[in-house]
Image (cartoon, grey):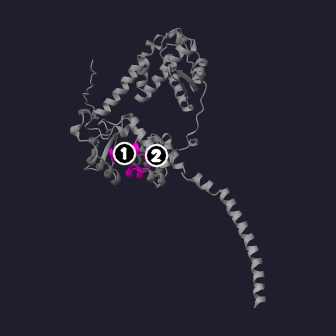
Amino acid sequence: MTEQKRRIYNRSGKPDNIVLKENEILDKCEAVQGELPAFLRGFSQYLKGSVLPLTRLAYLRDIRFFCDWLVRESGLTAAARPAEISLSDFGRIRARDVNLFIDYCRRYKVETEKSVYVYENAKRSLARKRSSISVLFKYLYRDELVPKNITDGFDPIKLPKPGEREIKALQDNEVMRMLDAVTNGEALTKRERLFWEKTRRRDKAILIFFLTYGLRISELRELNLSSFRFGRGEFKIYRKRGKESVMPLNRSALAVLKEYIEEERRSEDDLDESEKDALFLSLQGRRMTERQIRELVKKYTSIAMETARRAGYSPHKLRATAATSLIGRGNSIFDVAALLDHENVTTTQLYAAHKQNVKRDLVGDMEWETEFAEADARRENRAADKTGGAGAGEDGADTESEA
C-alpha cells in the first residue's frame, strides 16, 4: 500500500510549509494522546488554550512517560499499558508517588535485546516533567476527576538562576576562523571536503544568517525563496506564537544568499513540487532537516574552537553569538531583544552582562610559570653579570701589566 501524500488547502496567508509543520506537530500530539487513558482525552484540549503546540507535545510526552512508569515501575496499577490505566488508579496517586517518579527520572535505564541505555536528566528537564504532571493534576482536580489537588506536596526543584549559567558563544576571532573554514575548506577531513565542494555556498549562507539575525533553527529551516523580497531588501520569517517578522537584508547576507541561489542551489526543474520553494536544500534536493542543520553547525563551530566534532556548538549557541556580538558593538539591548524575538528584555540583559574575555584577562595576569621563568632568568643574568665583572677586572690587570 502506497503512502498517502498530504495536500494542504491553505487559506491562512502563511506558506504551505509553515502550515504543514504546524499540522505535523498537531498530528504528533494526537498520536501521543491516543496512547493515554481515555479519561485524559480532554487534557490536550485543556493545554491548547495556554501553551504553544511544541510545548503541548512535550507535556503530553511527559505524561505518557509518567503513565508508562506507573505501569512498569510503580505497582500502583494492574494495567498492562498506559491506555488501560483507570481513573480509580489515578485517584490513588499521592504526592509522594510523583516525587518518587521525579527521582526515578534523574537516572534510569532502558534495556533492549542488544543494549542497555542509561538516561540522565538535568534539573531543567526534571523541572519540566514536574510542571507537566502539576498541570495534569490541576486539570484533573478542576474537572472533578480526582478528589483532591496533590500538587502542593510535590518536592521543589531548585534551578540555577539565569545569571549563574555560563553563556556559550563564539568569540569574534572564532567566528572569523569558522567563516574561513567554510569559505576555503580549511581543517576539514578528506571526506568532509567531498561534501563541502558541493555545499560550501549553502553552508556559508546558513552560518551568516544565524550569526547576523540570531535565528532559531526552526525559523531558518522554514525559509523559502518566496520569503525574500530582493527589491525591498528584506525577508519574512515566522516565529513562535504564530508571529510574523520582517528582517532587512544587509550586504553580507544578500551576497552569500545570491551566490548560493545562483551558483549552487538546484534548479527548480530538478525538484519535486513540494520542495521548489524551500531555500536550503539537502544534496537529495529536499528541505534540510533540523538534524542536518545541527550537524553542519556543530562541524564548523568545532573547527572554530579547535575541538572535537562532538564538542561543537548547536545553532542556539550561534544565536547567543549574535546577541553577544551585537551588544558588544554598542547596540541597545531593547533593539537586540526585538531582533531576536525575546519576550522579556531580561533575557537579553544576560548577554549584556556577559563579558566574553573577563576570565581570560584575569587569568592572563596570573601566569605563574612565565613569571617564575622570567624571575629565574633574571637571577641567572645577575649571576652572570657578577662573574663577568670580576673576570673583566682580572683581564684588564693582565693587559695593563703586559703594557
Which SS does the magenta portion mostly show? Answer: helix
Q: Position of residue 64 (x, y in %)?
A: 47, 19
Range drawn in magenta = 179-201
Labelled disc at residue 196: 1
In reply to whether residue 165 is colored magenta, the answer given is: no
Quadrant where the C terminus sits is bottom right
Is 335 located above or below residue 130 in the figure? below
Within-10-Å neighbours for mark 2: few <14, some 14–19, many 20+ = many
Q: Position of residue 153 (x, y in %)?
A: 60, 21
How many badges with numbers are in the image? 2
Q: Position of residue 357 (x, y in %)?
A: 55, 53
Q: Residue at x 36, y 40 (%)?
A: 220
In the image, what residue type sits under mark 2? Answer: Thr
Within-10-Å neighbours for mark 1: few <14, some 14–19, many 20+ = many
In the image, what residue type sits under mark 1? Answer: Trp
Q: Is residue 239 visible?
A: no
The residue mark sitting in front, 2 or 1, is 1
Q: CA distance from mark 2 to mark 1?
A: 15 Å
Among the two numbered marks 2 and 1 on one chain, the one whose residue lies closer to the N terminus:
1
Q: Nearer the viewer, residue 327 or 67?
A: 67
Labelled disc at residue 147: none
Q: Secondary structure at mark 1?
A: helix
Q: Is residue 363 visible?
A: yes
Q: Is residue 366 left or right of residue 403?
A: left
Is 46 located above or below residue 301 in the figure? above
Q: Secondary structure at mark 2?
A: helix
Q: Which residue is mark 2?
A: 301
Q: Nearer the viewer, residue 185 or 251?
A: 185
In reply to whether residue 183 is colored magenta, the answer given is: yes
Is 79 located above or below residue 200 in the figure? above
